[in-house]
Amino acid sequence: MTCEFCYATQLYSAIGQVLVLRHLLDIDLSAFIDAWLGTVRPGGSCCVTISPHIMNDGDLNLRCLQTERKMIVHLNGWPGVGKYTVGKIVAERLGARLLDNHTLLNIAIALTDRGTPAYYELATRTRDLAFDAILKLPSSEPVVMTGVVASGGSSDFLVDNWRAILALAERRKCGVYSIVLLCSEEENVRRMGNEAREAHRKKRKPELLAELLRTRQLLNDGATASIEIDNTDLSPETCADAIVAWLREVAPSDKSETGNRVL
């Protein structure tokens, strides 16, 4: 039997997946819920713990799953695709720490010139200090990270960062779950133009995106499991729901699985 809390989270997970697919398939959400209720009933007890956090968003009013799973969740994608926005919601859903790439990079951006040896040296030292702090956290506490991981170009800095994340996971004895966010180039350019990016010292020039698309290739080699999500037409909340639902499938607390999917 499934306890009432787990019963609720299973239902909400299923609804989240349906919301992602609703723009592709003609799905009657109420009929889906009725059918699902006919196969799963609450009762009994289990080992999953639910935190009392309630989502601010009123669409689903879901309870946040306190996973206590050993994992690093990494959101990859081009600038402007929505890594920070979605990652912040995912961290809230999981009760996880959030370490976004600009928190790490902005010290180097403020004190050095981008692209110089001094910039990469300071950015690397800042990253290493942050990762040392992560090692002091309980290994069961999830950490959500964001950042571009891509090969190509004139610097290996992005690939080196990814290797550092994989090494961090090995030292924490946890998995790395990679989510690659994609959207149409037109939508990506529109998002890059958002004035709110200035507050985080994020670049807003569309020519940067064109250069990245021309010279670099997104990668996530070595991840425990990975998924690609096209969020062109998804709200940040719906995208986050899909990620959390996927994590529940591939990152159980009692075993490790690997896999690659595309949504």
Image: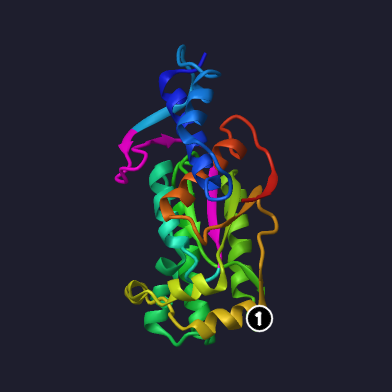
Decide if residue 152 is in sight here.
no
Q: Is residue 42 above or below residue 33?
A: above
Question: Does 99 lie within the magenta span?
Answer: no
Secondary structure category for the residue under label 1: helix
* Foreground of the two, 58 or 92: 58
* Residue 102 lies in quadrant: bottom left
Q: Would you say 74 lies left or right of 199 here? A: right
* Foreground of the two, 30 or 168: 30
Image coords of residue 110 (percent x, y): 37, 81
Question: Does 68 lie within the magenta span?
Answer: yes
Q: Would you say 225 lies left or right of 101 here? A: right
Residue at image mark 1: 214
* Residue 100 lies in quadrant: bottom left
Instruction: Tell me what residue is drawn at x 60 percent, y 53 percent.
Output: 178
* Foreground of the two, 258 or 213: 213
Instruction: Tell me what residue is drawn at x 62 percent, y 39 percent.
Output: 250
Instruction: Tell me what residue is drawn at x 54 percent, y 49 percent.
Output: 72
Q: Is residue 158 above or below residue 56?
A: below
Instruction: Tell me what residue is drawn at x 61 percent, y 63 percent.
Output: 162
Q: Would you say 255 lies left or right of 23 here? A: right
Image coords of residue 186 (percent x, y): 52, 74
Chain part drawn in magenta: 52-77
